Amino acid sequence: MLAFLKYYFQKLKESNAEIKDITKIINKTWVQFDNARIHKKWFFKRANQLSVSVNGTISDGTYEFVNGYLIVRIGSEKLLFNNSYFEKDVLVLERDSTNTETFVFFNENKLNKEDFITLIANHRKKALNIKELKLMDNTIVEIIDGNSKFNIEGKKVLINNKQTELKELETEKQLIVLNDSVITNRYFKGKYVLDKNNKVTILQKYKNISSGDFVSNHDNKLKNDFYKVGAIKGVKIENNKVVKVYSISKQKTIFGKQVEYWHKFKNSHSSGDVFFLLGGIANNGYYILDNFKIVKVKNGRIC
């Protein structure tokens, strides 16, 4: 948890939150936060008096600001802090040493430990622009800069604030491919029912199905064929791969027979469009539509 604090420290430094008014920290109960199971409370009082409680045992001392430094005396111990920050209910003191030691406190009258941890975690998420995803097994993963408007590929993934050796991450709606904890591909899981009873999942590069997408699983063996994936959209699948996407319009012949026009390009008619009659590929020949347009079909396609 202490590693998370650096993002909050950076925020305090950027916002110039140094202690300028000592009255804001006196007569409050400051709980020192660290990973040790030692319960410490600091009490800054008027007239530069200080009391520190360690597991209920109190030591008295003093504090004073000298040339921008905070000097603290607790019993025989003297501490020099070169940076001191305050924001609302959080107090941060940095000890002046070659190996910087940071003392972090929260105001017990306003926050409990859980509230403080949530506050720090939220600052980290904001600083790193983190997007969280829940996997199928309920594991929470973090994508660094995951809320960016740009592609998700190239973003780093963390689980419990560590890189992962997993090669794939699966959510309810996505499959994410990793290499060394970095996203290399992201697929959307499109779920369809083909031939009325064959449920399939198609891994899609985009939210809408497109050429190059592929079938990841299916209830029954999938033949190379044309399939509807909605009322007005169809696809041609070969070797479990989408090779063409069509938009579908419905018309009738002058004899009232139902036909489907599978357009390669939406709202346009072009050579190579697929022509279906009564649910199957139309035979070779000429067809007169109810708008008196004559269509020539060869091998199921418009000539």
Image (cartoon, rainbow, N blue to C red):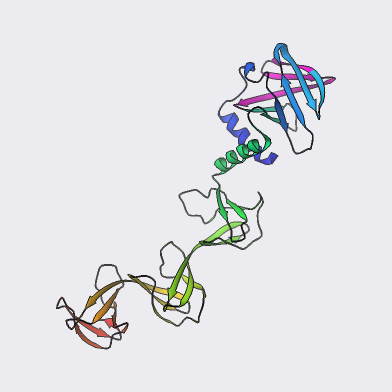
Q: Name the side, left or right, on which 153 lies relative to 166.
A: left
Name the spot of residue 189 as percent of width and height, x first. 49, 65
Instruction: Count the numbered circles shown.
Output: 0
| Residue found farthest to the top | 47
Position of residue 77 relative to residue 181, above or below, is: above
Considering the image in quadrants, where does the C terminus appear?
A: bottom left
Residue lying at 72% horizontally and 30% vertically, measured from the top left: 32
Name the spot of residue 302 as percent of width and height, x first. 26, 80
- Magenta stretch: give its range: 61-88
Considering the image in quadrants, where does the N terminus appear?
A: top right
Name the spot of residue 212 as percent of width and height, x first. 44, 70
Residue 102 in sight in this render: no
Residue lying at 43% horizontally and 61% vertically, measured from the top left: 207
Is residue 178 in the magenta section?
no
Residue lying at 64% horizontally and 53% vertically, measured from the top left: 159
| Residue found farthest to the bottom | 284
Which secondary structure is most common in the magenta stretch? strand
Is residue 62 in the magenta section?
yes
Position of residue 268 relative to residue 95, above or below, is: below
Q: Name the side, left or right, on which 17 lies relative to 33.
A: left
Residue lying at 65% horizontally and 40% vertically, measured from the top left: 4
Q: Quadrant of residue 124?
A: top right
Name the spot of residue 101 as percent of width and height, x first. 74, 32
Residue 4 in sight in this render: yes
| Residue found farthest to the right | 76
